[in-house]
Amino acid sequence: MTSDGSKRRYQEIAESLARRIAEEGYRPGDKFPTERQISLEMGISRSLVREAFIMLEIEGYLDVRKGSGSYVATGEKISLNIQKSDFGPFELLQARQLLESSIAGFAASTITKSDIIKLRETLELERRAIENGEEDYFADRQFHLRIAEATQNSVLVDHVEELWKKRENSPMWARLHDRIFDLSYRTSWLDDHAAILEALRHRNAEQARLAMWQHLENVRLTLLELSDVGDPEFDGYLYTPTVASP
């Protein structure tokens, strides 16, 4: 299929799979191939397939059952809402990883004592929220915004804020989180934040950049694994964390 600028890549994959359901005689209740099978068959990443499956779930093509897999919900050809402006959650994380790792590296050279104090206070808020079992990501969001603010560049702050708004307003992101029942991963992310803050405190630009890159890579891999509903033999080795060159 040729790329269409009006569609996102995951939407193209979802449209292809929807045609497959309609043209190959699938009936409601039939088991659909696993994400791993589709990934290998089409030669595309597991995260891209996950986004396509989530869209098919939202659009009523697939019924996703935790611990079992994906089942066809309808065998009829219905119209996919491919003009949606929604971003894929892993696409969004990749954008954040590229932008925020650079921001963290730059912030190491501009950060002030006041910024460090604010970041410590935000980490404490996040720690208390986790201990109290709150599902509020306010402190998480605030931590990332405060790092952008430490650059003293309002354009960078606006970019980070806009990416968080896209996440908060995304049906795709919400559906991804509906698949996740174990929230213990948030403790690991708090540790990641502490590592980022330590690098900033030492004004180590390269370490701050790498710490932010690794944090968002950990977020991506954790969400990919925890939202996996059908394949117990998750091939984590295919998604070994990589580090971007400067």
Image (cartoon, rainbow, N blue to C red):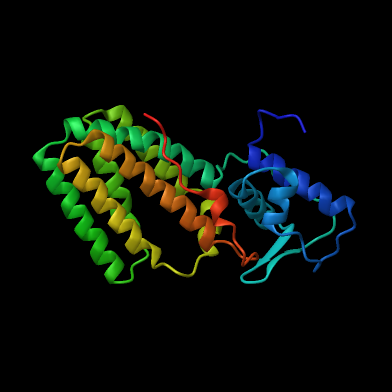
Q: Looking at the image, which residue is at 32% across and 31% down?
A: 156
Q: Is residue 133 left or right of residue 1?
A: left
Q: Is residue 112 left or right of residue 31?
A: left
Q: Is residue 245 left or right of residue 201?
A: right
* Residue 41 x, y percent position in the rendering: 75, 48
* Residue 62 x, y percent position in the rendering: 72, 60
Q: Quadrant of residue 206?
A: top left
Foreground residue among 190 and 167: 190
Q: Looking at the image, which residue is at 53% across and 60% down?
A: 225
Q: Quadrant of the N terminus?
A: top right
* Residue 142 x, y percent position in the rendering: 28, 48
Q: Quadrant of the C terminus?
A: top left
* Residue 58 x, y percent position in the rendering: 65, 55
Q: Quadrant of residue 244?
A: top left
Which residue lies most toward the front here? 237
Instruction: Please state the total of marks drawn on the protein image.
Output: 0
Residue 171 seen? no
Q: Is residue 226 left or right of residue 229?
A: left
Foreground residue among 96 and 233: 233
Which residue lies most toward the left here? 113
Q: Quadrant of residue 234?
A: bottom right
Foreground residue among 30 and 138: 30
Residue 117 seen? yes
Q: Looking at the image, which residue is at 22% across and 59% down?
A: 125
